[in-house]
Image (spheres, grey):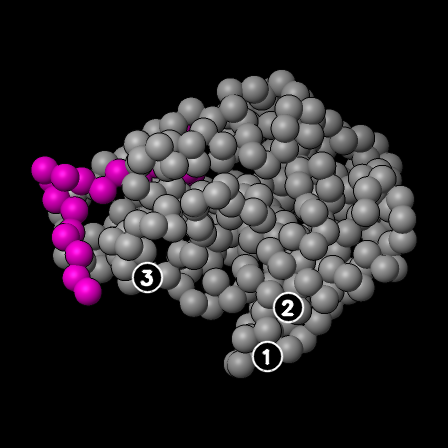
Amino acid sequence: MTHPLPSPAQPLKIGTRGSPLALWQAHEVRRCLMAAFDLPEAAFEIVVIKVTGDQILDKPLKEIGGKGLFTREIEEALIEEAIDIAVHSMKDMPTVQPEGLILDCYLPREDVRDGFVSPGVASLADLPQGAVVGSSSLRRRAQLALRRPDLRLVEFRGNVQTRMRKLEEGVAVATFLAMAGLNRLGMAHVARAAIAPEEMLPAVAQGAIGVERRIADQRVEWMLSAIHDRETGLRLAAERGFLARLDGSCETPIAGLAVIEGDRLWLRGEILRPDGSESITGERRGVVSDAAALGRDLAEEVLGRAGDGFFGWR
């Protein structure tokens, strides 16, 4: 079945947050669709939507609502048909979408690692005793507290440019930024070093861009199928399956990474106490077609080992 393509007269509306990185991601989705269907840039309209998470920067995410802070207003616009698709950083996405919406298109994944960023310190290992490190990520804070309980951790929110300015002002001596975002913005040089997953397992879905749509919109489903990256989809199915069973949100320190090796998938997962006093890790290997089930199974294992009260929830 063929569908009418977007045109300058009736452009496809792409919804996004307004940060430089979010705009880069929306432009990349547009570029992929332009290439797939030989369309001009004018056949698409980038619609910037203000989200709560970008407007309240002086409080930790867990105090103002968690992951939905970066998606709620965009998803409302999608439901109301003010936009046709929504572009998201997948590490920001809840594991359940609002009724009528679906996430089934992912672009090829970027570097999954965290980047160590500091004006004057070369690496995580070189941080002096008691150094002040800024991070808004509960996962990174818990992982740091586990490995370096001497460090003093402070809240550190905002886009890449805001965080770099805070470092220059001496609010902290170091912070962490996703290598994927730095690479996409042409700022890879900002990171002193990329941290291996063996040292700090990244956030679930870090480095992945997802495109959300209305389930009933068959034209958009057809168009997005042309740019979907299957390997990224399988890796995220495992990681988000792990996250979903753990009921993960911005209030819970959870890390996970799936890697595909031929027709096999290797999934590593970690849960931590928020204060970094304990970590439970595990892994699964299996066929790629069982990706989501491998994630759920690993979550069941770590939950069983954690017992009641590990997070204060179960």
| Mark earlier in primary sequence (3, 2) | 3
Residue 163 numbered mark, or none:
none
Q: Residue 293 shows which numbered tag?
A: 2
The first of marks 1 and 2 along the sequence is 1
Determine the residue positioned at 52% across, 24% down. Answer: 52
Query: Tag 1, which secondary structure?
Result: strand
- Residue, disc 1: 287
The answer to whether residue 131 is left or right of residue 57 is right
Q: Which residues are magenta?
A: 1-22
The answer to whether 91 appears left or right of 202 in the picture is left
Residue 258: x and y in percent read 60, 65
Q: Is residue 14 magenta?
A: yes
Q: Earlier in the sequence, mark 1 or mark 3?
A: 3
Residue 301, picture quadrant: bottom right
* Nearer the camera: disc 1 or disc 2: 2
Query: What secondary structure is found at the residue carrying circle 2?
Result: helix
Q: 10 Å neighbourhood of mark 2: few (<14), some, or many (≥20)?
A: some
Report helix, strand or loop for mark 3. Answer: helix
Front-most of residues 262 and 214: 214
Q: Main secondary structure of the magenta part?
A: loop
Judging by the rendered image, the residue that carries numbered circle 3 is 225
Find the residue positioned furthest to the left: 9
